[in-house]
Amino acid sequence: GAGVSQSPRYKVAKRGQDVALRCDPISGHVSLFWYQQALGQGPEFLTYFQNEAQLDKSGLPSDRFFAERPEGSVSTLKIQRTQQEDSAVYLCASSLSISGTETQYFGPGTRLLVL
Amino acid sequence: DAKTTQPPSMDCAEGRAANLPCNHSTISGNEYVYWYRQIHSQGPQYIIHGLKNNETNEMASLIITEDRKSSTLILPHATLRDTAVYYCIVRGGGSSNTGKLIFGQGTTLQVKP
């Protein structure tokens, strides 16, 4: 069946530009996570949704980062006024339930390069 | 911070077993050990998880020590496609846990012909 999909796969932005990254989770998955992965590092948690509710946004690095999941399925991560340090791979993951031990399934990521 | 310690890199000959160690000395009673791997330019892929008993699935085996302070992921017959970064993650259970994964640096496994 279809896994987690993300678009675009690659994005080049000029410094100061706004970007929007999309995540399509596995159908029926309640939980959705966003992670940021800098070059050569492990992924770092950004934010978590349970259906449409954003329950944890403790990992968002600044108020330039905003995420939403208005209908409890597709999610968008928006970065305003991008900076060079925002260059990274942004990963989305979904899991079936709200259980803290449910397996997370990851998308391929969006590679963002800010020039 | 990650609650696990892994060697930064390991090599393995194709067809041989790959044994990847992980230390998690501060693990608490309701925390699970999870393993994910990340092949170059892909998202992390779930491999296996366990609480206290050893576990086996079609991909790998997970051996957890009796005191639960360390574990070993075993790939029984490594292939070139197993070359990846392997992450050992300690993850809590319970309804108050959102389930976010805290990744460390992982172990880069290079399978050689």
Image (cartoon, coloured by chain):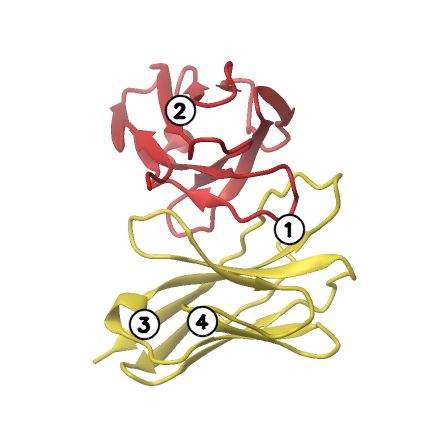
Chain colours: A red, B yellow
Inspect the image, locate mark 3, and give the three-letter code of the amino acid beneath it.
Gln
Q: Do the residues indicated by labels 4 and 3 lie within the same chain of the protein?
A: yes
Looking at the image, is mark 3 or mark 1 nearer the viewer?
3
Decide: marks 3, 2 in contact (CB < 8 A)? Answer: no
Say if labels 4 and 2 share a chain.
Answer: no
N-terminal-most mark, 3 or 1: 1
The residue under the point 27% across, 81% down is B14
* CB contact under 8 Å: marks 1 and 2: no
Q: CA gap, disc 4 to disc 3? A: 16 Å
Q: Amino acid at mark 2?
A: Gln
Near mark 2 (Cα within 10 A), the count class, few <14, some 14-19 or many ≥20, is: some
| Residue position marked by numbered label 1 in the rendering | B1
Vertically, is A114 above or below B48? above
Quote the CA–CA distance across marks 1 and 4.
Answer: 26 Å
In-image side of A90 versus A47 (left or right): left
Q: Position of residue B101 (x, y in %)?
A: 57, 47
